[in-house]
Amino acid sequence: MSKPKVYITRKIDEKYLQAYQDELEICMWEKEEEPVPRETLFREIANADALFAVLSDSIDEELLSKAPHLKIVANMAVGYDNIDVEACKKHQVVVANTPDVLSETTADLGFSLIMATARRIVEADEWVKQDKWQSWAPFFFAGTDIYGKTLGIVGMGRIGEAIAKRATGFDMNIQYHNRSRKKDAEERLNAKYVSFDELLETSDFIVTVVPHTKETDKLFNQAVFKKMKSSAIFINISRGKVVDEEALAEALKTGEIQAAGLDVFDEEPIRANHPLVGLKNTVCIPHIGSASVETRTKMVRLCLDNIQAVVKGEPAVTPVS
C-alpha cells in the first residue's frame, strides 16, 4: 500500500523529516528561500494528499481545483490569511496552523525591536562599521529609556500577553486595547484596558499584534499616527497590511512619531528602495518573528503531526477549519 504523499513548498533539512518518513512520502521544493513556482505547485499538488505550506503560499480556489486528493493544508504559521478557508471547506480540505508554539519567540522578537529602536542599536552599529566613530559627546547616539515608560499593546492575544510579561521586568506601565477585555491578563500582568484612542495618545511604545481582517486593514493610518505622541515608537510584528506604509513613512520623516520597528510589510519581500528602508529612525527586518531554531523545529513537527493525523482519518491537532 502506497504512503500518503506530502508536498512541502520550501526546502527543509531531512533531519526534521526522518521521524515521519516511514508513514509519509515526503516531496519538497528544492529551494529554501525562493517560493515554489505556481506551475510547479500545480503539478505537484495533483497527486498530493497533504500540502505543507508557508505564509507566502497562496492557497486559493484555482489551486484547490487542481488537487483532487488533497485532505489537508498545514500552514507553517499562526496566521492563515494566505489561505481561502471557505474554498478549502468547499473542497473538504482541512486547514491547520501552528498556534501556541511561537508565542514566546515572537514576543522576544517584538521586545527586541522595542530595545533596538529605543536605543538606536542598528544605527549605532552602522556608525561603527562605517568607521565614523571619531569621538564621544554627552548626547552621542542618545536614545530613549524603556524602563518605567508606558507600553500600549493593540491585540491582547497570546503574543500580546507574552510581550506584557516581558515588559513587567522593565517596570513598564502596561495598557492594552482588544476586541474584548482580558480581566485575567489584567490581574496577572497589572495591565489596564483602555480605548484605542487613549492608548494612542498616552503610550510611549505601541506594539500591534492584531490579525489582518477587514476591520484591521490599514488600521494604523495617517489619522492614527497623528494621535500618537511625537516621542512614540511604533512596533509591528503582526501583519504588514494592518499599516498604511505611506502614512507611516511620512509620520517618521516629519517627526510625527519618533521611530518604528517593523518585522512585517504590506508586500513581502521588500526591496532596498522601499520608502521605510532608508529611514534612520526605522528598523526593518525580514519577517523573522518566530525564527529561532527551537521554535521553527516545533512548527515543522506540528505541521507534520497535523498532516499525519488527518491522512489517518483522525482530527487535526490544531485545526483552523
Image: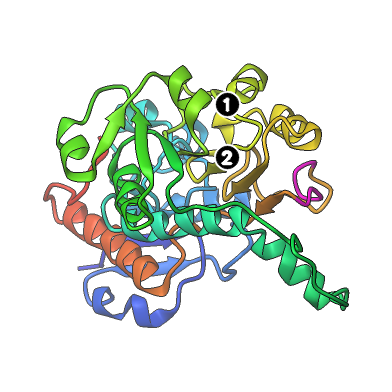
Three-letter code for the amino acid on which mark 2 is drawn: Phe
Q: Which residue shows up at 28% across the image and 37% down it?
A: 191
Q: Quadrant of residue 224?
A: top right
Residue holding disc 2: 234
Q: Which residue shows up at 60% across the image and 29% down it?
A: 229
Residue holding disc 1: 220
x, y (%) of residue 82? 48, 38
How would you classify the magenta stretch by its main secondary structure? loop
Give the class, few, some or many, for how many residues have Cα within 10 Å of label 1's Cα (few <14, many ≥20): some
Q: Which residue shows up at 29% across the image and 52% down it?
A: 165
Give the class, few, some or many, for how many residues have Cα within 10 Å of label 2's Cα (few <14, many ≥20): many
Q: Earlier in the sequence, mark 1 or mark 2?
A: 1
Toward the front, the furthest residue is 138
Question: What distance separates the C-alpha of mark 1 from that of mark 2?
Answer: 10 Å
Quadrant of the rendering where the C terminus is positioned:
top left
Q: Disc 2 on helix, strand or loop?
A: strand
Range shown magenta: 275-280
Quadrant of the rendering where the N terminus is positioned:
bottom left
Q: Disc 1 on helix, strand or loop?
A: loop
Asked whether the beta carbons under mark 1 and mark 2 sit within 8 Å of each other, the answer is yes
x, y (%) of residue 7? 42, 60
Q: In this rendering, would 90 be left or right of 275?
A: left
